[in-house]
Image (spheres, rainbow, N blue to C red):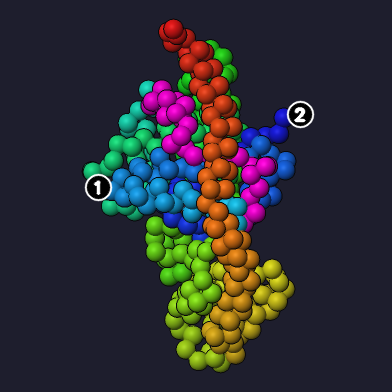
Amino acid sequence: MNKPVILTGDRTTGPLHIGHYAGSLQNRLRCQDDHDQFLLLADTQALTDNAHDPAKVRRSVLEVALDYLAVGIDPARTTICLQSHLPALAELSMLYLNFVTVSRLERNPTIKDEIRARGFGRDIPAGFLCYPAAQAADITAFKATVVPVGEDQAPLIEQTNEIVRRINATAGVDILPEARAVIPKSGRLPGVDGKAKMSKSGGNAIALSASSDAIRAAVRAMFTDPKHLRVQDPGQVEGNVVFTYLDAFDPDEAGLAELKAQYQRGGVGDGQIKARLEEILQGLIAPIRARRAALSKDPAYIVDVIRNGTEIARARTESTKREVVEALGLFRL
Ligand code: ATP
Ligand code: MG
């Protein structure tokens, strides 16, 4: 029995953060044995809104790969591959762009939100507007049926499946499988300022490589309940970033429930909840940081891991591209 194929990955725009740990990396660790898992270092996609800074996109390839290995992704069980070195992805993207309209791309809710967030106005890089077609190429080239994404990304999977149905209908044969979005229950972790979601590009993240001082400083500066001025005052838990993070990372559910009740009654200071969170985050990040430091002494090994994974992925994606071109009945020499 073939294992279900998972395609997931990260834009190479900076080191990964604890939002990735809660929202995707833990799940990827669990999927290593019972799935055929591919992790895409999405450097081409990163360029769609970072064309002004290709050096950052290049540098971040090793950073993200290091983070994968440091948290325990095992290259023997998960294939780590580099998007820009898989030409079949670019070729399929070009084909798929003929099966989607500009107005459909502009109506995609994820794209609409992201265009607004980046303040592109009418000056949208064409590559950015078209990245849903490129993402459809990524997913289908691996024939992935399981795609773990944040809930804001679900419209991209819908768009992928629309393209899949059009290609299959035109070819007259079900050449490509539809994919299913798997959305984590945990939701998106907010940034340390409690506003937007934590993101590599937002300057609001705690990196998985953060130093112990950086973790302490980030937790100290965290937003709590602005009305909770004295220890004895009742405090609010909802919208309190420290509790949002405790919900995500504190393994002691009963202890946390008790602390929340005390905080709401009054008598618990912000220093106390911050100390608890800091201890948990220091404990989570210290071993990752240590493994990362050890691995980073041997960049040639990281490059080898990416090169080997990319070769495996190249065979897989080339074969799908050939099948699609054949099924569509294009001229072949
Ligand atoms: P960028 O700022 O460059 O967009 P990012 O931090 O948003 O970077 P991505 O590479 O865009 O990271 O996201 C990859 C995946 O990581 C997402 O599909 C999502 O599953 C997960 N992820 C990203 N940010 C968070 C977050 N704050 N909380 C939970 N999961 C997240
Ligand atoms: Mg993002």
Magenta-drawn stretch contains 302:
no
* Secondary element type, mark 1: loop
Q: Residue at x 58, y 52 (%)?
A: 68
Label 1 belongs to which residue?
Answer: 121
Q: Quadrant of residue 20?
A: bottom right
Q: Where is residue 24 in the image (x, y as percent from the top left)?
A: 58, 52
Circle 2: element type: loop
Kind of residue at badge 1: Gly
Residue that appears at 54% across and 57% down? 296
The mark that comes first in sequence, 1 or 2, is: 2
Q: Which residue lies furthest to the right in this view?
A: 1
* Magenta segment boundaries in residue numbering: 71-97
Q: Which residue is drawn at 76% across and 29% down?
A: 1
Q: Relative to 26, does residue 100 appear above or below in the rendering?
A: above
Return the residue found at the far left. Answer: 122
Q: Does the residue labelled 1 lie within 8 Å of ligand 1?
A: no
